[in-house]
Amino acid sequence: MLIPTNSTEMVLRDDSSEGAAALRVHQVISRYSDGAANGSSVLVGFCSDLGVIANSGRPGAKEAPLALRRQLYNFAYYGPRSLFDMGDVVADEDSDLALMQGELSGAVLRILTNGGRPVVIGGGHEVAWGTWGGVRAYLGEDQLRSKRVAVVNLDAHFDIRSTPIPSSGTPFFQIANSLRDEKIAFNYICLGVSEVANTGVLFQRADQWGVEYVLDREMQNYDDSLISEILGRFDLIYLSVDFDVLPPWSMGAVSAPSTMGVPLHVVDGIIETLVASQKVMAIDFAEFNPNFDRESLFARSASRLVMAALR
């Protein structure tokens, strides 16, 4: 079910006595409204780590939406986009992962239909199947065929595992299969891939499918030409960010920490450039695990990337 965000659970700073230019996110963000969503960025939380557990990861990512909002809501905000918060998709007594993903798809579709840009905070990377469901429903078969649509994933892992039970390791396998069934191109670009975190089978599958990828060791500096080349080839982008793409020393609070990772400033620059292009339809963030945070330091780094997606 979808429940509203409760900001009373947060400690919020107020500098508004210094004027209108001293506002923070919590002072400019509003509860979501269909009629006001056009041209805005809309937060949605996805409180699930069921896919992480199914993938033998460390549970706890379901608590990420609240942990990240506690930081994000206190960040200074300069615009230019209006901000809304739709609340969280949470499990009830009868929920399973597929039901939660379906509800997220509906929320993403609703935001897109009303002209907003969904910014989804997971949860495990099973969030991607839910976000994609909304993107796909919004585009429909005609646009998926006529537009050049890319799935860009900033991630240490391909997440194209083939297992009987869907998990945080399968979302892009699921997306690929769903498109293949309709004979629609699967334009998948994975940035920050770790050679030691993906088996040979996954690299073989990526090569067979024509997946474009860049290894983490090849992304230690920001390369504007890489992102410009992607933007030049595609009309629309669904962007997914797994926080485990970051180095373990700057992001240890994830379901499966990286061994090398892509520096925070590089990931921030990629998100900022992609979002500024106006080609990004929807964005989700995955795998932050507050159980392994210390004094909310990792939550602040993660929230900095979410902020880049909101602007």
Image (tube, rainbow, N blue to C red):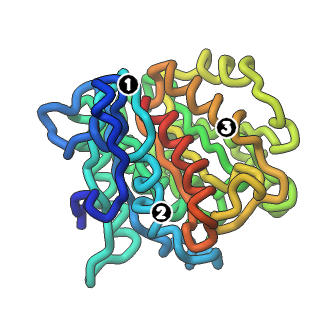
Provide the secondary structure element on which disc 3 rests.
helix
Residue 71 rendering spot, x and y as whole percentages: 46, 51
Residue 161 or residue 100, whichever sits in front: 100
Residue 267 bears which disc, if any? 3
Provide the secondary structure element on which disc 1 rests.
loop
On the picture, is 162 further left or further right than 262? Answer: left
Return the residue found at the far bottom: 93
Residue 110, placed above or below residue 94: above
Q: Quadrant of residue 113?
A: top left
Q: CA distance from mark 3 to mark 1?
A: 20 Å
Residue 8 rendering spot, x and y as whole percentages: 26, 61
Return the residue found at the far left: 35
On the picture, is 170 further left or further right than 201? Answer: left
Residue 161, placed above or below residue 195: below
The amino acid beneath tag 3 is: Val
Residue 16 or residue 96, whichever sits in front: 16
Which mark is first along the chain, 3 or 2? 2
| Residue 211 visible from this viewpoint | no
Which mark is first along the chain, 1 or 3? 1
Residue at 29% from the left image edge and 29% from the top image edge: 82
Q: Which residue in the structure is indicated by mark 2?
A: 64
Which mark is first along the chain, 2 or 1? 2
Image quarter in which the N terminus is found: bottom left
Q: CA distance from mark 1 to mark 2?
A: 24 Å
Q: Which residue in the structure is indicated by mark 1?
A: 79
The amino acid beneath tag 1 is: Gly
